[in-house]
Amino acid sequence: MPLHPTIPAALLAACVLAGTTACSTPTPAPPKPPLFVRLGGMPGLTAVVDDFVSKVSVDPRSKRTFEGVNLTRLKASVVSHVCALSGGPCKYEGDPMALAHQGMAISKEELSVMGHYVDQALRRQGVAPEDREELESMLDKLGPEVLNK
Ligand code: HEM
């Protein structure tokens, strides 16, 4: 039994009289910040990229193409690429994906090993499941370019 059973009825009457649906329409959720912010901004993104590039470049299933590559430079370039893709304040100045991976003959397995480490890095960084999915689906769309297909 509500303490003041008349209040909801009075509220409803006020809504009807005011001729508005505002009383029954839930307030819309505020707009989400850009994915870049939800990834933790530059510190979060740098930690994620550092984590997954370090892993994918030593895993026996995927290290092949990283031999002799300057990982510090590569990580900085990947950060800038993902930052720009996710709505962050960066301008990616590296090569387009097809050109950057040209001649490497990257396999689907290598791509999926990277995907695994990206997911693991995002989880470790505490990125929310829906934000992980958003980034992962952005990266999935680049798959054909990376595979040069
Ligand atoms: C969606 C997936 C991928 C994205 C978004 C991506 C992104 C990038 C970016 C931004 C660069 C730097 C290009 C530049 O600075 O001009 C790069 C280079 C490179 N990527 Fe990827 N990459 C992906 C998948 C892969 C995979 C699966 C491998 C291998 C397993 C790989 C291996 C490399 C290597 C070895 C380089 C360095 C090339 C060099 O400096 O000579 N990438 N990638």
Image (cartoon, helix red, strand yellow):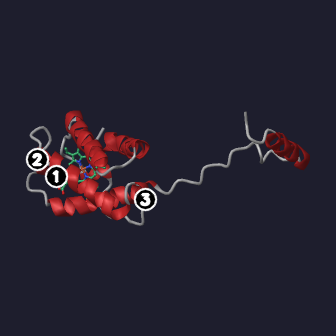
Residue occupied by mark 1:
54
The foreground one among 107 and 12 is: 12
Assess whether mark 1 and mark 2 are in contact (beta carbons under 8 angstroms).
Answer: yes
Nearer-the-camera pick, 89 or 15: 15
What residue type is disc 1 on? Ser
Callout 2, which amino acid?
Answer: Val
Q: Earlier in the sequence, mark 3 or mark 2?
A: 3
Would you say the residues marked 1 and 3 are in contact, meaning their CB atoms lie under 8 Å apart?
Answer: no
* Above/below status of 35 relative to 90: above
Which residue reaches farthest right? 17
Q: Residue drawn 13% across and 50% down?
A: 66
Q: Which residue is mark 2?
A: 58
Total marks in image: 3
| x 73%, y 43%: residue | 25
Query: Which circle, 3 or 2, is nearer the viewer?
Result: 3
Q: Residue at x 12, y 37 (%)?
A: 61
Q: Quadrant of residue 62?
A: top left
The answer to whether mark 1 is within 8 Å of ligand 1 is: no
Foreground mark, 1 or 3?
3
Q: Earlier in the sequence, mark 1 or mark 3?
A: 3
**In terms of secondary structure, where does tag 3 sit?**
helix
The amino acid marked with disc number 3 is: Val
Which residue is under mark 3?
Answer: 37
Quadrant of the rendered image containing residue 64? top left
Dot 1, crowdedness within 10 Å: few (<14), some or many (≥20)? Answer: some
Residue 19 at x, y percent in the picture: 88, 46
Q: Quadrant of the N terminus?
A: top right
Answer yes or no: is residue 51 visible: yes
Q: Is residue 4 left or right of residue 104?
A: right
How far is mark 1 from mark 3, CA to CA? 23 Å
